[in-house]
Image: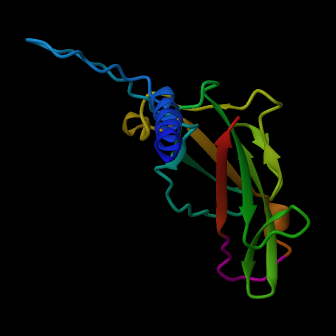
Amino acid sequence: MKQVARSLILIVFGSATTSLFAATDGTLGATSQGDFDINLSVGDLIQISRLDDVTLTYTPGSNATNSEDFCVYTNAASGTYNVTATSANAAAGVFRLASGANFIPYALDYETVTLTSGVNSNNGGAGYAANTTSNNCGASDNATVDITVTEADILTQPSGNYSDTVTLLVSPN
């Protein structure tokens, strides 16, 4: 009886293990051939790169403006992405430069869409176009943010060095 039970266990175990594999063993002979499958799953990937610090210069009679160009790559099938920008000094979604207890608001436009700090932007649902062939965009840029501080806002604050840190979070659309 013990021998029958062992045989049944081996048969059950043996059939369970062979059904899990798609590989085919060869047969005994002068030559033998077998095959097996290789599988790889790659999820959506995205990368932002080529960012630089931005300096704004104010000239009386105009707004202080500058742009930052950079690269966004994704392997997502859509080829598009969403972006969320956050500001270290934001208040109620408004981007702000700080100097001590003084703040100057500024606008951050992403590919012509005005962003709100902490709010996801997907360009009206379509997403923003990413580079889909090179994770460094072939050493060029495909995205731009424009920074604008109005002269009216500059003139309301005392002199000083104002700064902020903006974080851009990108995700496949």
Image coordinates of residue 94 in percent, x first then y, are 85, 62
Majority secondary structure in the magenta region: loop
**Magenta extent:** 157-164
Residue placed furthest toward the left? 30
Q: For this rendering, which residue is in front, 126 or 101?
A: 126
Q: For this rendering, which residue is in front, 9 or 141?
A: 9
Image coordinates of residue 50 in percent, x first then y, are 46, 50
Q: Is residue 42 left or right of residue 36?
A: right
Q: Quadrant of the C terminus?
A: top right
- Name which residue lies at 17% across and 16% down: 28
Image coordinates of residue 96 in percent, x first then y, are 78, 68
Residue 25 visible within the image:
yes
Q: How is the image coloured?
A: rainbow
Quadrant of the rendered image containing residue 111: top right
Quadrant of the rendered image containing residue 46: top right
Q: For this rendering, which residue is in front, 64 or 110?
A: 110
Residue 42 visible within the image:
no
Residue 161 part of the magenta-drawn span: yes
Residue 32 part of the magenta-drawn span: no
Image coordinates of residue 68 in percent, x first then y, are 57, 50
Q: Is residue 89 above or below residue 166?
A: below
- Name which residue lies at 56% across and 37% down: 43
Quadrant of the rendered image containing residue 38: top left
Q: Is residue 108 above or below residue 111?
A: below
